[in-house]
Amino acid sequence: MTTQRTSGRRKQALAAAAVVAALLTTAACGGGGDDENGSGGSKNGAAGYDAANNKVAQAAEAKKGGTLKFASTQDADSWDTTRGYYGFMWNFSRYYSRQLVTNKTEPGKTGAEVTPDLATDVAKVSDDGKTYTYTLRDGVTWEDGKPITSKDVKYGIERVWAQDVLSGGPTYLKEVLDPKDEYKGPYKDTSKDKLGLKAIETPDDKTIVFHLPQANSDFEEMLALTSASPVRQDKDTKSKYGLHPFSSGPYKFESYNPGKDLTLVRNAEWKQSSDPVRKAYPDKITIKFFTNANDLDARLIAGDYDIDLAQTGLSPQGRTTALKEHKANLDNPVSGYIRYATFPQNVKPFDNVHCRKAVLYGADHVSLQTARGGPVAGGDIGTNMLPPAVPGAEGQKYDPYEMAGANKKGNVEKAKEELKACGKPNGFKTTIAVRNNKPVEGATAESLQASLKKVGIDVEIDQYDGSQYASVIGSPSNVKKKGYGIIIMGWGPDFPSVQGYGLPLWHSDYILDSANNNFAMIDDPKIDGLFADYLTELDDAGKTKIATEINHKVMEGAYYLPFVFEKFINWRSSNIANLYTTDAYSGMYDFVNIGLKNPKK
């Protein structure tokens, strides 16, 4: 649906967003001062406002036992460790799956570091960065008590190659270990043991060796993803595996009704002595799926459930109630996502850098922030394209267009200078593409529409089916046909590095005919070259420096208008203990070691 003016409903939505933003700004400054609303705890035992934001809340109060209750309006894309791609799935799956290495169970940036899990230590890496060797721990077992072997790990990774059967999950390991796409996956493997991938050796049941054709400095980060979990061949039900994965962790599936509920119970064969990562506090872990966000939030606030599985923040209605009455149950983490507009260069006049810069200077960044929910529920004004959790990020310190500074309300004069420089002194017309299932994107588009009108850029807004984004905005030919000069989207890191965030957005190899994410159609040899340098740079300081340089090149090209470094208002029940946010999962709570203060509740 195309619209050129704000509807009455949209005006109401924008007004409501402004009210919530004002309320949230007050909350950020301290809010109420009594026990219930203040930051120092509450009458009902809640830890306090932001008590679990990048720090551990009530660690000593976690007890064994009880049922930890998750709730969500969204089921996982798949609970199959090979196929899952939702961030909350990766987080939750550590209850029933283990990897050679995983993320540290510590708050903030430290949580994004890798630590041994099934392996006795992090990798022994060859000097050329191409060979990674691991030894498995003693006592690691499946839910039936059989040992987990190196061959189980190899087979689980090989399943990533079976994209015709197990599509949907990350494919980093496939791309790094088999860049020529020579292996056909275990289901088409002609070797007797179905372990024909030559890039992985298993000389014995305890040893696994990876041979990379080319070095990749983030390889161990990829092995920490859930897609590197072991899978036992005799338990592999292929496309049905996500209905009942076979557990290598402290919990196992008891029941799963897609879209309704999921229950995990203790895996009696798991041994604490074999697992340095997981504490396994609850006896049972459940998820209840709701169809209405307001209903979900009301049940969380009522104490019927402990935590929101999706970790995308309370809805405006729930936020308002929670901030007034239960502030001590809330955290306000940076999500790890950047919300932005991007400019496809195959749609004129956005093939001209000055026309792109005209939009950057013409935008009212405070208005865009308000449309996203304000400084607390929306986030700090975005000034560049590298999320705060990624090494090399500089946050608002790097603000080349002064979006959070002198030009935060827009700069009409500079915008018109750029229009003149790009040969469009009287402005131009274009179309913004937004998903129809993301109301906040519609509000953001209308904010941008209003501010650009002041500089002579006439914008129409086209809402498309959000479930079809891969074929609508992911098709460069369709983008050009529709005249989508501006696309509103958001992106977060698969793992906290410039590769895990920016490679599919900014590298020319990732310009695809369909399911394209390089929406700006960036084909810059300098950016490609910096990524090549990054992959072979094994020194952390060197990697950080290159990541910063890549971000600067992206911003110099004015390919993006960042809106916010996104933040959420997340709920935790007063009965939760040992809780903290982590950069490993884009500012989510780390699920794996949550405990209950009163397991009998």
Image: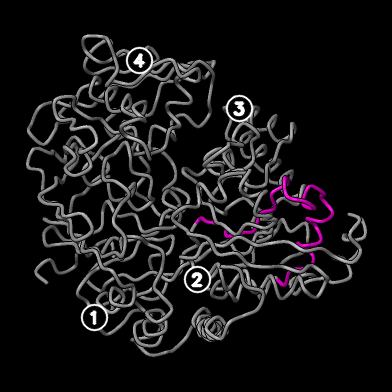
Percent across and percent down for residue 72 are 29, 64
> Of marks 3 and 4, which one's residue comes earlier in the chain?
4
Percent across and percent down for residue 342 are 66, 54
Question: Disc 3 versus disc 4: distance between alpha carbons?
Answer: 26 Å
Q: Amino acid at mark 3?
A: Glu
Q: Are marks 1 and 4 in contact (CB under 8 Å)?
A: no
> Of marks 2 and 1, which one's residue comes earlier in the chain?
1
Residue tagged 2: 439
Residue stretch in magenta: 336-364
Q: Is residue 383 magenta?
A: no
- Out of 196 and 478, give the one closest to the viewer: 478
- Residue 197 is marked as 4
Q: Are marks 1 and 3 in contact (CB under 8 Å)?
A: no
User: The C terminus is located in which quarter?
Assistant: bottom left
Q: Is residue 556 above or below residue 200?
A: below
Q: Is residue 79 left or right of residue 586?
A: left
Q: Are marks 2 and 1 in contact (CB under 8 Å)?
A: no
Q: Is residue 556 visible?
A: no
Percent across and percent down for residue 42 are 31, 82
**Circle nearer the viewer, 2 or 1:** 2
Question: Disc 2 versus disc 1: distance between alpha carbons?
Answer: 26 Å
| Number of residues whose C-alpha sits closer than 10 Å to that of mark 4, classed few (under 14), some (14–19) or many (20 or more) | many
Question: Disc 2 versus disc 3: distance between alpha carbons?
Answer: 42 Å
Residue tagged 3: 537
| Number of residues whose C-alpha sits closer than 10 Å to that of mark 3, classed few (under 14), some (14–19) or many (20 or more) | some
Q: Amino acid at mark 4?
A: Leu
